[in-house]
Image: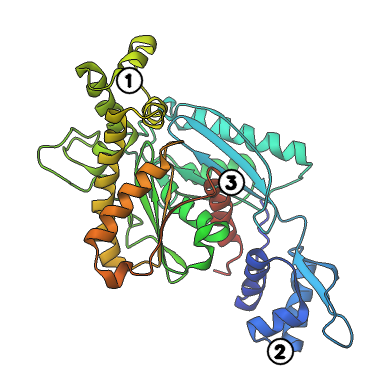
Amino acid sequence: MTLIRPENPQQARLVRLLRDDGPRSRVELGDILGLSRSTLTTELERLVARGLVETAGLAASRGGRRSSLLRLAGGVRFAGVVIGADRITAAITDGELNVLAETGEPADVRGGPESVIGRAVDLVEKLRAELGIAELTGVGVALPGPVDGDTSIAPAVLPGWQRFPVRDAFATELGCPALVDNDANVLALGEHHAGIGRTFDDFLYLKLGTAIGCGLVLGGTLYRGATSSAGDIAHLPLGEDGPACVCGEVGCLEAYAGDAGLVRAALAAARSGRSPALATRLTAAGTLTVPDVAAAATAGDPAAQALVRDAARRLGQVLVGLISFFNPSIVVIGGAPEGVGHILLSEIRGVVYRRSAPLATGTMPVVLSDLADRAGLVGAARLASEHVFATD
């Protein structure tokens, strides 16, 4: 594979600015980056020659001769892949990380990495063919669990993935640089690029679902920690006598507020007769799912609503500690079951604002993400672009 990337820090700053802000005039680029006219001209010419930047017409007049607009070249294309517990989604973006096409299909990660990665590669290749793209600039991949460099370290949700070289597999199959990270980090990157978090340099992204995680953006940069495990909050202990968790312990946050925890509590409510709505659904289907819980709660079932509120209170308790420690400007929550986001948000806000120090939360919003599945796809493409648009 041929990796075309910036040659020096000035070029890296230029392409990242064009990625994040879109087309800019030469004058604007020079003003924002503090580059002299001669340096700017030299570096832009080199980027054009390398196929990373192209002209895009003339900028609006500022008096005198009109300046040319520059943008990332049309040949810069990234792929984003999000591997969930039961679904694969993939997208191809332009250099500014606008989604050009996307697709997805059900999948079971327990089937092992070879088959899942093979299906993900097929989805990307399908999109590439539809768009007529000869080659990709890079691919970013989100996994539903901890990642150590280029490999999964196999939490319970990813049996058989232990130390599998996920990055190398994608790079080999797609013929371009590949980067891999856990889904909470990738979602935070997507939120920072295109969502509510775009205007904040310090925020927390709380990811709900099968696995619970937290992405931390501090000082405008994703914070991974010393061993890339920052934000791994799923197994924080909330009680010594709580429900059993897939990690082998009891009372973990995920055991209370993850999808499996909600379903476990819903089954208990149905079988005990506390929730006629869930009991009816259990009789008809033989099991319950998170959408069943959400549907019952939305329809006004008191027991189902109580389950959602209890999970939200647990999440709020953990957020109180995180907010006190990191002092973010905003908390963004993604992955809430459809229809019950307002119930979760109301309960989480109640706990956070009641139990946190006023100085930390006085101007700090707690909101739901408005990007839905796009956060992961954009974040995965952003992950790849961070590697390609670097000089080291």
Of residues 350 and 51, the one drawn nearer to the viewer in this rendering: 350
**From the viewer's perspective, is 209 left or right of 23?**
left
* Place of residue 158 in the rendered image (x, y in percent of width and height, measured from the top left): 37, 34
Residue count near mark 2 (Cα–Cα under 10 Å), binned few <14, some 14–19, many ≥20: few
Say which of marks 1 and 2 sits in front: 1
Query: Is 289 located above or below residue 177 in the figure?
Result: above
**From the viewer's perspective, is 170 left or right of 346?**
right
Residue labelled with disc 2: 36
Query: Is 181 located above or below residue 126 in the figure?
Result: below
Q: Quadrant of residue 38?
A: bottom right
Q: Are marks 3 and 1 in contact (CB under 8 Å)?
A: no
Calculate the distance from the C-alpha at mark 3 to the C-alpha at mark 1.
37 Å
Query: Is 331 located above or below residue 241 in the figure?
Result: below
* Place of residue 214 in the rendered image (x, y in percent of width and height, measured from the top left): 36, 52
Return the mark for residue 278: 1
The local secondary structure at tag 1 comes to helix
Residue labelled with disc 3: 80
Residue 184 appears in the rendering: yes
